[in-house]
Image (tube, helix red, strand yellow):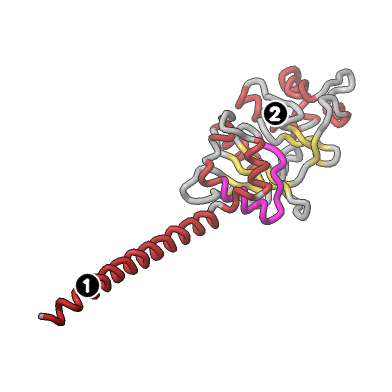
Amino acid sequence: MLVIALFSPLLHYVLVIHCYLSTVNSFIYHLEKIINTIMKISELTSYKNSPAYQSAIDLGSDSDPGYTAYSRDAVEPLIGRLGDLGWKNIGKGYEGLVFSNPNKSYIVKLFIPTVNSKELLKFIINNQSNKHVPKLRGKPVKINKNSDVLMIRMEKLEPITSEFDPLFSQYFPPEKSGGVWDLWELYYDDPKWLKTNHPDLYEIIHFTYNMRNEPDYHIGNIMKRNNTFVIIDL
């Protein structure tokens, strides 16, 4: 009994120290798990530091319904990945983002398919021989199985800087002249003449005219390949 009495205080302190060390070890264990989790999250979201991602964010804000509709959770990591591979965000439309790489002969477009864009894409795929549609590299693919966003590769084209670029004049009858805004009137005024003299142009204007009644032709959705203009949007 005397021995137990002598060692009881010591046992008490040993138990206290043991409990303290157990608590510290448990704390360290959980702290390491938290740190590892943070590191994994950082790795998964590191694309947000990519210049390409930041550029795309600058081009589209939360107030822009076109950009907000891109399904950010699916698109944002891909934007960062494209940036890592040398692709630069060069513009956006209401339904898509466009990326270019100086080492590639094509551009990459990300877009959400709408009724109009689906029909236009179908026309482009089925009419690759038409000189007024962009040439595709492969077929459009979903960026992942859970997203509606599509990615497609298209030929690089040159911008048109003037509504009255001289290249448009070659498509008008000798007694007429006009710019990009007047193209659809060629179909409206004399479709037979247009079909006979410029069948490729007739086909795409016929398509877009039926889609929208009055096609929205402007230098924002028309580019050029050498001396030929290419319609890239409705």
Direction left: furthest residue: 1
* N-term mark: 2 or 1: 1
Observer-nearest of 159 and 200: 159
Q: In the rendered structure, does residue 37 fall within the stretch colored magenta?
A: no
Q: Is residue 119 visible?
A: no
What range is drawn magenta here? 76-92
How far is the residue under mark 2 from the one under mark 1? 97 Å
Q: Residue at x 55, y 52 (%)?
A: 45
Which picture quadrant has residue 193?
Answer: top right
Q: Residue at x 54, y 55 (%)?
A: 42
Residue wearing tag 2: 205
Q: Residue at x 68, y 47 (%)?
A: 51
Residue wearing tag 1: 9
Image position, residue 22 (x, y; %): 32, 68
Observer-nearest of 111 and 63: 63
Q: Residues within 10 Å of mark 1 (few under 14, many from 20)?
A: few
Observer-nearest of 137 and 49: 49
Give the position of the N terminus as an image quadrant.
bottom left
Image position, residue 225 (x, y; %): 81, 41
- Residue 66 lies left or right of residue 102; in this view the side is left
